Image (cartoon, rainbow, N blue to C red):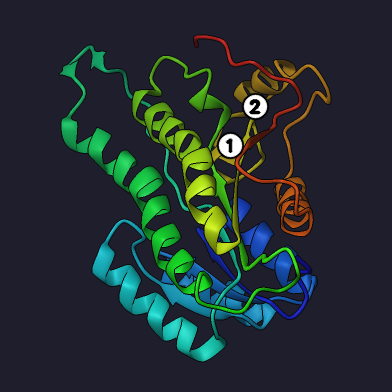
Amino acid sequence: MKIAKQVAVVTGAASGLGEASARFLAAAGATVIVVDLDTAGAEQVAAEIDGVACGCDVSDAKSTETALATAFEACGQPRILVNCAGVAVAERIVGRDGPMPLAEFQRVININLVGTFNVMRLVAAGMGGVAPLDASGERGVIVNTASVAAFEGQIGQAAYSASKGGVVALTLQAAREFAAMGIRVMTIAPGLIDTPMLQGMSDEVRTSLASQIPFPKRFGEPGEYARLVGHIVENQMLNGDVIRLDGAIRMQPR
């Protein structure tokens, strides 16, 4: 699918991977619906890329349905969805103060996994009703975001690893289900990307983490994620799989 002249939804688009993806897609000619819980941040990014801001909590059904319906009315039906909204919590299942609060685990699952599913179901429902773009019957593309933690969860990453593992497991299932509608589903599993989450760490910790990456020995850049999103959208044979974007890192237990 060509990106130009399409409508795209990007969640978590006020910063990090989502912002980079929104900017990349807009530069390639798409009209981007910038979704984020940070409404002010979404409005700023949308203004800079001539997109439409959509402030909502992706883990809340009603909030998301209402916000997306308004955005779709303004922009038209999206054919591209990039799910980047997510949070990370570092906490052991059983720590010094006892078991991890269940509410913390549930919050991460709700945002990272339920939120991904929520937006995917709403956008895919509309995608399935638009006209095919070509003789193959393609109608749309969905790109979800997992993490290498889905495969090599570190100590303290129980909630994050479980949420991203769920996104990985959803990939092939959704691709098989949506095949009849001409919708492809892919997932990117980033390694250490230089987003605000890593930028808040000390230089010592950042240097230590970067040294674990076989090659290149540096953090990935959000723009590299965004360019991969663009390739997935345009390469019709990419479907139902997970691509690691990690410089060959395999995370150690801690």
Observer able to see residue 48: yes
**Residue most extreme to the bottom:** 74
Q: Name the residue: 77% across, 29% down.
A: 218
Residue 14: image location, x then y, percent: 54, 63
Disc 1 residue crowd, few under 14, some 14–19, many 20+, Cα 10 Å: some
- Picture disc at residue 212: none
Relative placement, left or right, of 62 versus 3 is left
Residue 58: image location, x then y, percent: 36, 60
Q: Name the residue: 56% across, 78% down.
A: 130
- Picture disc at residue 198: 1
Image marks 1 and 2: residues in contact by CB distance under 8 Å: yes
Residue 225: image location, x then y, percent: 71, 47
Q: Name the residue: 47% across, 16% down.
A: 154
Q: Which residue is mark 2?
A: 206
Q: Which of these two is toward me, 225 or 39?
A: 225
- Type of amino acid at the residue the image marks with label 2: Arg
